[in-house]
């Protein structure tokens, strides 16, 4: 029997195909609760939605994210473009002799081992980890997008701990050439047949100021499926830029021309109409970097049937961590009036803020909307598809879900 969450994802996919028209191709995944996530990735909760078996793409049903302020690794989503054969587990990586090579525009080439990193000063971030394709299926309501049609559960709130790059450099007397503008990160995972190896370039200043080479996730050695033993983590950015199975950092003057950086994981510099094609280049687009202001209703869920009376609306809000979330407003009449929700912020600017609001919902169909605002005044657009892009990245439209009260 297919679960309610699976039916909901199936109907969303069918709707997206209907919008795309009779010539649309089948979506490249079949989310199905018959697939036991725990049987595919040891230590994962069996309730996760399996969007793809290998490389693993698992989505977290939203109500599960209300169970813990810090998302346990058993419930944390997975989005892998490549995946080592021995990484299908939430247990720590078996590789204890791992190291990272520092190359390019630095005064000396350097190799730092896992053990050496363990002996350095540790920095910990509580932070939101979010796939840049989270919410892609919502873009597809305007026009079909490419790739896995994520719902809204490609997100979690976790604690990464590791060593700042500045600490590594100070410890080893590393100086950076003035011509360096970017750091290109690579992992040890092999490219899939016919694909390019996964690389990303990151701005040097942000890497030096924020990035850590992560050793731990939620107080334990970094799990293999989430990039262990080492992962490059920069809080406040989309997860694609947080390189898993890290083994090389190359200090360069220009961004990588690797397909995954120069063509994939980019959004247009200009607005385009839903359905338009776009020839991505380094010059006409930008990579998925700072996370946009966003709120997500975790419960109730899209399509739920509720009893008449008081309902507690719960969710989370977050941004790029440059300032705090100051307000979350909820509407139950399609934006005609709004009520301020109660907030429970994280101890970290990079973590998510929980919100809740009690509402009396009489019998009938109801639309629940919510929007977050941060201290810079940044908020969510009424219609998220205003920034539609062919790959469906960086959705942050006002949250809009429908429930039945009967």
Image (cartoon, rainbow, N blue to C red):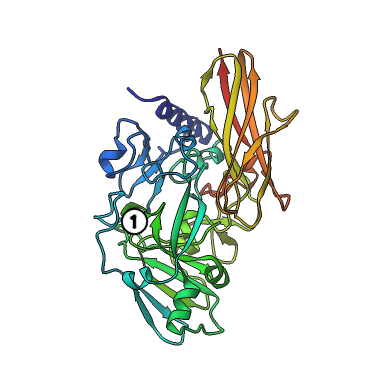
Position of residue 43 relative to residue 9, above or below, is: below
Residue farthest along the right direction in this orientation: 337
Disc tally is: 1
Percent of width and height locating residue 143: 56, 39
Quadrant in which the N terminus appears: top left
Q: Nearer the viewer, residue 393 or 152?
A: 152
Residue at the image point whose x is 44% and y is 60% from the top: 161
Say left or right for 145 vs 198: right
Residue farthest along the bottom direction in this orientation: 107
Instruction: Say which quarter of the image contains residue 194.
Output: bottom left
Helix, strand or loop for disc 1:
loop
Residue at the image point whose x is 54% and y is 18% from the top: 306
Percent of width and height locating residue 94: 24, 59
Instruction: Say which quarter of the image contains residue 222.
Output: bottom left
Is the residue marked by circle 1 packed among few (<14), some (14-19), or many (20+) residues within 10 Å? some
Q: Nearer the viewer, residue 314 or 279?
A: 314
Say left or right for 137 vs 54: right
Quadrant in which the C terminus appears: top right
Percent of width and height locating residue 312: 59, 26
* Residue identifier under label 1: 82
Residue at the image point whose x is 28% and y is 49% from the top: 89
Percent of width and height locating residue 308: 59, 14
């Amino acid at each position: 029997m297919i679960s309610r969450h699976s039916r909901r994802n199936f109907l969303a996919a069918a709707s997206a195909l209907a919008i795309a028209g009779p010539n649309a191709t089948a979506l490249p995944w079949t989310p199905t609760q018959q697939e036991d996530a725990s049987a595919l990735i040891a230590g994962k909760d069996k309730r996760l939605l399996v969007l793809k078996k290998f490389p693993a793409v698992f989505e977290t049903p939203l109500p599960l994210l209300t169970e813990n302020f810090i998302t346990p690794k058993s419930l944390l989503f997975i989005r892998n473009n490549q995946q080592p054969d021995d990484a299908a587990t939430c247990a720590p990586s078996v590789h204890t002799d791992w190291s990272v090579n520092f190359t390019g525009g630095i005064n000396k080439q350097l190799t730092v081992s896992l053990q050496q990193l363990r002996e350095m000063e540790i920095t910990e971030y509580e932070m939101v980890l979010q796939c840049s394709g989270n919410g892609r299926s919502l873009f597809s309501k305007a026009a079909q997008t490419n790739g896995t049609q994520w719902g809204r559960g490609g997100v979690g709130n976790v604690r990464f701990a590791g060593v700042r790059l500045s600490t590594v450099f100070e410890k080893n007397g590393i100086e950076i050439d003035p011509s360096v503008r970017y750091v290109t990160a690579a992992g040890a995972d092999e490219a899939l047949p016919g694909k390019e190896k996964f690389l990303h370039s990151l701005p040097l200043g942000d890497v030096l100021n924020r990035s850590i080479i992560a050793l731990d996730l939620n107080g334990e050695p970094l799990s293999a499926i989430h990039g262990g033993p080492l992962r490059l983590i920069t809080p406040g950015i989309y997860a694609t830029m947080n390189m898993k199975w890290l083994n090389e950092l190359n200090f360069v003057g220009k961004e990588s021309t690797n397909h995954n950086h120069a063509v994939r994981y980019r959004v247009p510099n200009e607005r385009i109409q839903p359905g338009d094609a776009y020839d991505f280049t380094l010059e006409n687009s930008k990579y998925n970097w700072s996370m946009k202001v966003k709120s997500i209703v975790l419960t109730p869920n899209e399509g739920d049937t509720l009893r008449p009376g008081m309902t507690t609306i719960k969710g989370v809000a977050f941004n790029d961590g440059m300032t705090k979330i100051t307000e979350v407003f909820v509407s139950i009449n399609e934006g005609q009036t709004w009520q301020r929700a109660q907030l429970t912020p994280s101890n970290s600017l990079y973590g998510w803020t929980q919100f809740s609001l009690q509402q009396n919902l009489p019998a009938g169909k109801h639309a629940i909307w919510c929007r977050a605002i941060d201290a810079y005044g940044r908020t969510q657009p009424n219609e998220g598809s205003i920034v539609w892009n062919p790959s469906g990245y960086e959705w942050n439209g006002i949250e809009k879900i429908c429930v039945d009260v009967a």
